[in-house]
Amino acid sequence: MNTVIVLLDAPEPWQIGFQDSATPGFEGIVALHDSILFYLVLILVSVFWILFAIINNFNSTKSGITYKYLNHGTLLELIWTITPALVLIAIAFPSFKLLYTLDEVIDPSLTIKVTGHQWYWSYEYSDMLAENGESIEFESYMVPESDLEEGQLRLLAVDSNLIVPVNTHIRFIVTSTDVIHDFAVPSLGLKIDATPGRLNQTSALIERAGIFYGQCSEICGVWHGFMPIVVEAVEVSDFFAWVDSN
Amino acid sequence: MSADAKAQEQPVKRVLQTVGFDARFPNQNQTKHCFQSYIDYHKCINAKGEDFAPCKQFSRAYKSLCPNDWISRFDEQREAGTFPASLEP
């Protein structure tokens, strides 16, 4: 399983777009972003059109103002009041729809407990208890620059990846032991605070195998930038093989 | 190793199963789901005994949801009599 390492789902230098999506949740987020961007461009163009038209047509040497007694225009006011309201509705409703859809965790098959620490992540799998009743538990530390091997990503590689099965509804229970951290993996559409004393739930359905990189996304102390997250999605049979080997 | 060889090696049917949705805890915050499952399990075994199979459902729930640190802390509190909820059936 560890012989083939594909480093696709990692950020690139100077990247401005999204990483490739691996879950339906992130597809939804990208779709919402794109549809909001449509309104954003529309508003940007019309505002700048009006701005430059006014600068061009009504400057100090050239003034087209003839409506000396115009101080009220009901139709114009209705247009500039109702249009932004419609735009806000067109943005808000799909946004709520996505928000509440992402919040649903109806029928998960696997629960993984994620705990943030200063400054590393630890993971627990307790659904498949071993004979002695012990769950799979491990800690995941960043690989320091001096120990990096060929092909490993600086500030992103960790010593133990979070192994998860593909095409499986996974529930993540996220918490912390010290300060607030944030469990974030862009390709999976995950970003959820790890708060001490509280268990936050989120979910992912990973649609393809791969290695997905994320970072702590809540400033949590001096080594906040050195506690990356690596999710390795493998086929279900490989996942069971991994479970048995632990 | 081919997929066939693997299937022969592991004829055991494996099931991925975890605690499902609970209408009492529909929110992102699942803290109470863990805590209540822990209470329910101990109320259950106090009433019916450790071997009563239906109690296992609660134990699976709290073991899947509660961080292991929390479980050991709950256990210590229970033994010291300082657990902050009644476990009487």
Image (cartoon, coloured by chain):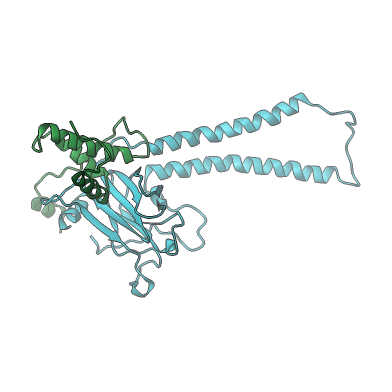
Identify which residue is drawn at 63% across, 40% down: A42
Q: Is residue A234 visible?
A: no
Residue reaching furthest top? Answer: A74
Q: Quadrant of the C terminus of chain A?
A: bottom left
Question: Residue B16 is drawn in which quadrant?
Answer: top left
- In the image, taking residue A60 as reference, residue A147 lies left or right, namely left
Q: Nearest the camera: A99 or A216?
A: A216
Residue reaching furthest front? Answer: B81
Compared with A190, A221 (above or below) is below
Identify which residue is drawn at 85% across, 42% down: A58
- In the image, taking residue A71 as reference, residue A181 lies left or right, namely left
Compared with B16, A163 (above or below) is below
Compared with A142, A116 (above or below) is above
Compared with A18, B32 (above or below) is above
Residue reaching furthest bottom? Answer: A146
Q: Quadrant of the N terminus of chain A?
A: bottom left
- In the image, taking residue A119 as reference, residue B76 lies left or right, namely left
Q: How many marks?
A: 0
Tell me residue B1's x, y (percent).
Answer: 15, 59
- In the image, taking residue A97 as reference, residue A6 lies left or right, namely left
Identify which residue is drawn at 49% across, 40% down: A32
Question: Residue A98 is drawn in which quadrant?
Answer: top left
Tell me residue B41's x, y (percent).
Answer: 19, 37
Tell me residue A195's x, y (percent).
Answer: 39, 49
Q: Nearest the camera: A95 or A2?
A: A95
Identify which residue is drawn at 37% across, 60% down: A118
Tell me residue B48's x, y (percent).
Answer: 11, 32
Q: Is residue A76 visible?
A: yes
Chain with cyan colouring = A
Chain with green colouring = B
